[in-house]
Image (spheres, rainbow, N blue to C red):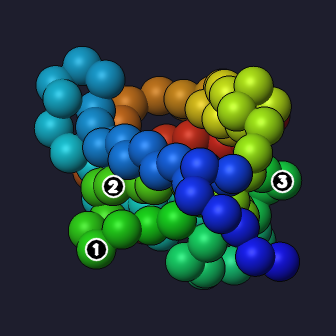
């Protein structure tokens, strides 16, 4: 499929993973993706939005799975992905092998 200029868009959002109390970076992006996919993976495709780890383990990127022309639907999909049902349990992890989150 050939797209012309401004027929579709690609959006990327990058989030730093930090401790909610101290704002210290938490290098757990690999564990976060593992908890979503069941194995270590660089990506988690969730409909219109794909999650990816970046060069460092304290960054997670949410991006369009493919170019999209419906920005309203894309907005809703990003919102749903950002609000995935995650519960933070106990203290923030001190090491990536000790994630403090679990999926509901």
Q: Nearer the viewer, mark 1 or mark 3?
A: 3
Residue 86: in sight, yes or no? Answer: no
Q: Which residue is mark 1?
A: 55
Q: Between 79 and 32, which is closer to the camera in this rendering? A: 79
In the rendering, which numbered label is found on residue 47? Answer: 3
Q: CA distance from mark 3 to mark 2?
A: 21 Å
Viewer-closest of 50 and 95 = 50
Q: Position of residue 22 (x, y in %)?
A: 16, 25
The residue nearer to you, when weighing 65 against 14, is 65
Extreme-front residue of the structure: 4
Give the quadrant of residue 73.
Answer: top right
Q: Which mark is residue 59?
A: 2
Cβ atoms at labels 1 and 2 below 8 Å apart: yes
33 vs 91, left or right, is right
Question: Which quadrant of the view contains residue 20?
Answer: top left
Q: Is residue 104 in view from this perspective?
A: yes
């Amino acid at each position: 499929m050939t797209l012309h200029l401004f027929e579709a868009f690609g959006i990327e959002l990058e989030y730093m993973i930090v401790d909610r109390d101290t704002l210290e970076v938490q290098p757990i992006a690999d564990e976060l993706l593992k908890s979503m996919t069941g194995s270590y993976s660089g990506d988690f495709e969730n409909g219109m939005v794909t999650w990816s780890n970046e060069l460092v383990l304290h960054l997670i990127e949410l991006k369009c799975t493919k170019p999209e022309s419906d920005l309203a639907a894309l907005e809703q999909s990003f919102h749903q992905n950002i609000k995935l049902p995650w519960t933070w349990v106990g203290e923030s992890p001190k090491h990536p092998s000790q994630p403090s989150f679990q999926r509901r």
